[in-house]
Each structure stands twice: as C-alpha cells, then as structure tokens.
Image (tube, coloured by chain):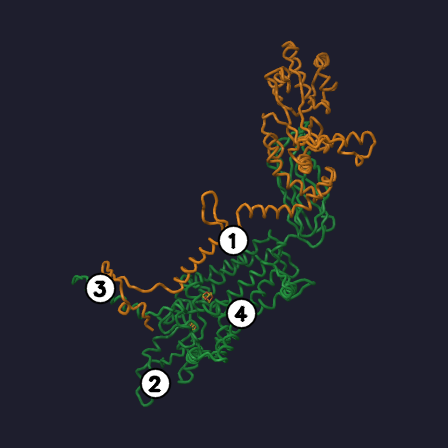
Chain colours: A orange, B green
Amino acid sequence: MADKKSNPAQVEDTGHVWDGIRELNNPCPRWWLNSLWLSGIMVIVYFILYPSLPLVNDSTKGLLGWTQIKEYKEDLAKVEAIRAPSETRLAAMSVEEILADAEMLNYAIGSSKVLYGDNCAACHGTGGAPAEGAGYPNLTDDDWLFGGSLNDIQMSIANGRAGTMMAHKDLLTEAEVDQLVKFVVDSANGTANEAGLALFNAKGCFACHGADAKGIKAMGSANLTDKIWRFSGDEEQIRHTILHGVNDASDPKTRIAVMPQWSEKLAIMLQVRADAIADDEDPNDIDWSDELEGDEAERLTETDIKKLTVYVHQFGGGQ
Amino acid sequence: MSEESKKQTTSVDELYEEVSEWHINTGGIKIVAKRLAGRFRTLKWLGMSIWSVLFLGPYLRWNDSQAILFDLPNRQFNIFDITIYPQDIWMLSLTLLFFAILLAAVTSIAGRVFCGYFCFQTVWTDIFTWLEGKLEGNTPQKAMKFNNAAWTVNKVSRKAFKHTLWLSIGLLTGISFVAWFTDAFNLWNNLFSLQVSVTAAVIIAAFTFGTYTFAGFMREQVCFWLCPYARLQGVMYDQDTILPSYDAERGEPRGRIKKGQDNSAKGSCVDCNVCVAVCPTGIDIRKGQQDGCITCGMCIDACDSIMDKVKQPRGLIRYASYKELHHNAKAIPLYKRFRVIIYALILLGAMSGIIYGFMNLSPTEFKVVHERQPLFVRLSDGSVQNKYTIKLLNKTKETLEIRFDIKGLDGATLHGLKLMTVEPGKVVPVTALVRVSEDKLKEGVTSLIFTGEVLSDSNITLKYKSMFMAPK
Ligand code: SF4
Ligand code: SF4
C-alpha cells in the first residue's frame, strides 16, 4: 500500500532544494491543525473567563471573577472550618483541662508551633532553649523565676514579666563584691560558708533572694542555690549582675530582662478570677463589665495564650 | 537547476522510492481483522477471562467488609485478614519490582506474551472489535459495504447501539476500578442516588472516555505509537527468544497452487493472505519480525488452518527463535541463558522479600524520636534531662494499653509517661522525659533502650534503641 504522502514523486514541492534535498509540500496532519485551532479557541475562552488584559490601573476581571487572593481566602476558610470545632472546644477549656485531654493537648501543641515560632522563639529559642549566653530564660528546665505551674506560665505570658535588681556598684566595696560573688558560686555547689551568708544578710540581699537564698517567686528573684543561672555562672558575669543590677534604670550597664505583655485583658481577668477564688467567691459571678474597660491591649488572644501555656509547659519543665 | 544537482535529486528520489514501499500504519485505514478459531484464539480468551477479576473482585466479602479494599483515605490496604499500612509499603515496591521483572523475563523467553494475551489495550480492543464485527460485518468487505451504505434506520440504530455498548463497557470498567478503592456496594448506592464523590466521578468519567477512545478508535495505534512497553521490546529479545515467525526457507517462493501446473518449485506459502487478514495490527508477518507484532498468534492459527487444507504439515508460521530459523540451531535451554538466570534471581529475591514481609507484618510501629532542640537540659539539681517523642502506631484491630520503661542506662529515670492507650489504626505522639543524675553521667552520648509492654497481649514486644545526650 504505497502511501501517496510518502511518495516524493507524487507530492508537489515548494521549489526549495538544499543539497539536493527537495522540500515537499505535504499538508500538516489534520489532528495537528485541529489542535492548533483548538488551542487558539482555548486562549480566547480563557481571556473571557479569567482576568487577562492589563488596563491602566487594573485589568479585565473575567466572567468567573476568579482572583488568586480570593482562592487563597477560600482555602484559608476551609482550613479554619476544619479547625473550628477544636478551637471552640479549646476556648471553653481551662489550661488544666487541655493538659489532661490527650486529643486537645495534641491539637494545642500542633497549632502552637507556629504561634511560638512567630512570637516567642526569637528570644526563647525553638524548643524553648535559647542560645547559650543570649541571656534569655530557658523554658525547658525546672527552674522558674515566676513559677512553672500552668497558671503561673499563663500569667507570665499574659501580663509579661520584668524582674528588678538594684545596681550595687555604689553600695558595696570591692572586697564585699568579691566575697558575694564567691558566696553565689559556692551556693550553687552547696559549699557556701557562714561568713558569706552573714554578708548576704547584712547587705540586704535576703530581702529579695530570700533568707535561704532560694529566691522568691512573687518577686521573680533568682534561686542562687541551684545549678541554673539566669544569666551566667561565670564569675565575671556574676560580678556584673551584682554591680549593675537588672532593669535598674539608673545604671546604663544594667541587664535588661523584660518579658512583654501579650494580653492586658487576660492578665486582668486572671487576676480578678484568682482574687475571687481567694475570697471564696464564685468566679462565674464576676461582672466583667465592672472589671474591664474594653480598651485593654491584646497582642494575642486568650485561646492563643492558652495554647502557648500548654506548649511551654510540656517543654519538659512544667510543674 | 544545474546538471549536477539534477542528478543528485534523482538519486535522493530513488532513496525515497524505497520508503514508499514501507507501510507505516498511522491509523489511516481501519483494520477489520478476520476472526478464526484456533489454539491461540482459545489462549487469548483464557488470558482475557482473567480480567473478570477486575469486575467481580470488589464484591467479594470477608468478615462483613470488602475482602480486598485499597482504602486510600484511611491509608491502609485491607486484603482479607491482613491490613497493610504505609509503613509496610516497601512490600508494594517489591511487588511492583516482581511484576516488572516478570514482564522482562517472559518477554525474553517468549516475546510479548503480555501484549498478545493479556494487555488491557488488546483485550478491550478485542471485545470492542468483536461487538463491532457482530453489528457492522466482520470482514473488511462487509464493513466497508456497511459504512458506505446510505443512512438507513437500520444503519443508524446499529451504530447507536455499538456506541452505547462501548460506552457502557467503559463506564463499567471505570466503576469496577473505583470499587477497589471504596466500598463497592456503597459506590453503587451512591451512583444511583447521584451522591458519588467528585474524585470517584472524575475517575469513572476518565475511564469511560479513555476506554471508549482507546479501545474504540485508537486500537493498535496505541501499541504502535503510545505504549512505552512496546518501545522497549527490542532490548528484551535475543536470538533465543521464541516469537511468531514465518519460516521463509520453507515458505518461499510463495505462490498460489494451480491445478494442472507444476507446483514443485514453489514453497509452502500459498499466498492466501489469511495471515494478514487475521492480524489485529494489520501487519504481514512474512516480512519478518516487526514492531507492530503483538505476538498474539492469530496468524499461526490462520496459517495452520490453511496448511491443514492444502495437506501440508502445520507450522509454516510458528513460535520459533531467530537461531532456529536462521542457523538451524537448537534453542539453548532456559537455565543456561544468562538473562533468564538473572531475571529468575531477581524474581526469587523479590518474592522472598514479599513472603518475608507478610510473615513478619508487625502488629505495631514503634518509634522514639529524640528532641533535637535542645538536645539536653540541665536541671536545677544538676541532673540532665532529655526529651523524647514516642510514636506508636497500632496496626491491630484492638485497643492497646502499653506500659513503657527504659533500660540500658544506669541511673536513668522515666518521667511524664508510664501508661498509654492507642486505638486501632491510630498513632498518638506522646512526650517522655528521661533524667540522669549528675554523678551517673559519663559520656556525651549513651545508648538507651525504650521498651513497651502491651498489657493485653504479651506476644507483642516493643523495643526501640535511642540515645541519651549530655554535655561532654
Ligand atoms: S504494545 Fe503496549 S498497549 Fe499494545 S498490547 Fe503491548 S503492552 Fe499493550
Ligand atoms: S503478526 Fe501474527 S502474531 Fe503478530 S500481531 Fe499479527 S497476527 Fe498477531
């Protein structure tokens, strides 16, 4: 079956000859031409349906009204719809309840990863351990300045924290500073002597760090007897802390240690609730319109803070 | 045009001249293959009948659920009593390897057995052409007559019936395919109440359309121009591969036998062209081995029937190797063929792997992931704490209650996790803390073994070797 198309003798040519090779004038295959036309039509259909022609300030909208941002928002809404049941449940639960419920705990941890990464990790480090020497509190150990219970952690996040220590450079002689540095180092190792303790008491350190040098939670003062250092266990660094203090505005060399407030509203609510319970009142009877002005700052929502509280608590140090 | 270039042109044209003798099947002419009964036709029906499993398999029940269900949304394959989770997917890879090599092995021994007797392309095409033959005539002449005839009611209804049949087969194919991935009876319910999921609908539509065009219109063109397997044939053959071939030495010079003539100079081929007429891909096997041949053996059946008629021995066209035809050599036994040995070894390896996998399907998947950030935490009493995430997948059908413990590291204590329950098919990540007191710490990295005791089933042992990190 000799095909006419492949028999050069029967096909006209374009008259072009290169190196003795004639260019035949076979028509394009029909399926090929058809697809070419079809693609042309597709382009027109596309132009009509989708945003396509750029105008001066804008572009044509297309019949479908499709935009990228709209698609993004729709998808986001889908994700939120999936999360909604868990979010509603979470909003009604206390931090203790979340911790006790394996499923919600999992959800809280999962959704906290981003929250923590966006808001907390810059100082406290991914996973709760800041870079060594960076001077931020480690959230994974069992030493807490302001307490490591769920409620303490929640309050710390909501209200923020800032411990204070006076600069002692004008209050102590050099010899006294030396002696106190030695006392602090020895305390951590459990080898502190009477003389050191006497000076610690005489200079009023006990007022903040406690008579046993174990720190006072309400003030956020450091426990000097454990092996965890708020700033550093290096003698030079300890001397620096004693001389210049923490958050002492009068000393430009003072250590800055401020945890920002993430929700003034929640901080007030937690306080009011705690007071009510302390006074043997039912926290459900609190009239919030009395307590809240309505213009309290809220950088994170209450639910977000709850999630973060559980997240931080399960880093390994929660009490 | 100069004298010289004219001469050149002619010589190039002469080159082309030969090209025009080649017949390249680009689908311009619809092939209507004659159907003849015979050994290979029977074999083909047998091969085709295996496909009934595709249609019937999903309705098989086992313990009140579908016997074989590839449950993708729940990420598990249910095969009778066995459940396979993504963790065991290496067995699927081995299965694929097994069949890929089996294909190569069979091809190197007897050519395109798959194409000829089993491939869905040829099987569905065979059914479609069979229906078409019934309705529009089963020889090229009858078919042409039918198609050239005026559009009578009879013709239109026959055509319409054909396309309806084709589409129904396509639809059934699609539904049957989907039924392996979702409960079959539910699927039919959903189909009738028009509640079938978009995914299922799209797949069914794609199958219907695909079957209709591929088996109805493209047919052997798929094998010629689309199928990747067909492109690879050449490298899998060697001179010992047996293929349907025409014994040219015996057949040539071909020619019709005429009564009252001296036919002694003629070969066995009576040039009846029946072998060409029956070929589903429209090739002439007498031109030698060619890429269009799907080795279906139809031409063997055809030729044998002619040889019987002219009272000559069968086998003018037969399964024969290149060596046999061209060197009169005997075929080498299979076990001496290097390729076959290699293929057999791989097949054996893959098969053993699959069997091993099935025998050792673990009822659980236990993993302990050491926290990376931070690697360790120093606690206020000087001890060091490491954090782990324990992941336990329950592959059994019961809820498991597990008690965890650690061993292998002196002075290490486990905190935060003792007992845990995991529901069937679930994996719950939980946190475990391990502490080692300061005086017990020796090295930066020590190995540590997590063990789990399943309270309800003492046959399951859980063990995972992890490590404990401490400051150097
Ligand atoms: S060439 Fe490809 S499509 Fe054709 S029969 Fe063989 S495997 Fe099937
Ligand atoms: S040549 Fe023979 S074996 Fe090959 S496809 Fe045609 S009929 Fe089948």
The residue to which callout 3 is attached is B9
Name the quadrant of the N terminus of chain B: bottom left
Residue that numbered label 4 is attached to: B167
Note whether ligand 1 is within 8 Å of mark 4: no
Cα distance in 3D space between marks 3 and 2: 43 Å
Which chain is home to disc 2? Answer: B
User: Which mark identifies residue A63?
Assistant: 1
Q: CA distance from mark 4 to mark 3?
A: 52 Å
Question: Toward which corner of the image does residue A138 lie, by quadrant?
Answer: top right
- Residue density around tag 3, few if under 14, some if 14–19, many if 20 or more, within 10 Å: some
> Residue B334, located in which quarter of the rendered image?
bottom left
Compare residues B405 and A177 and report the one nearer the observer. A177
**Quarter of the figure that contains the C terminus of chain B:** top right
| Place of residue A204 in the rendered image (x, y in percent of width and height, measured from the top left) | 72, 14
Q: Amino acid at mark 3?
A: Thr
Q: Which residue is mark 2?
A: B257
**Residues under labels 1 and 4: Cα distance?**
34 Å
Spatial separation of the CA atoms under disc 3 and disc 1: 57 Å
Tag in front: 2 or 4: 4
Percent position (x, y) of residue B66?
65, 63
**One can see residue B433 in this view:** no
User: What is the chain letter for disc 4?
Assistant: B
Contact, mark 2 vs mark 4 (Cβ under 8 Å):
no
**Residue sitting at the far left:** B3
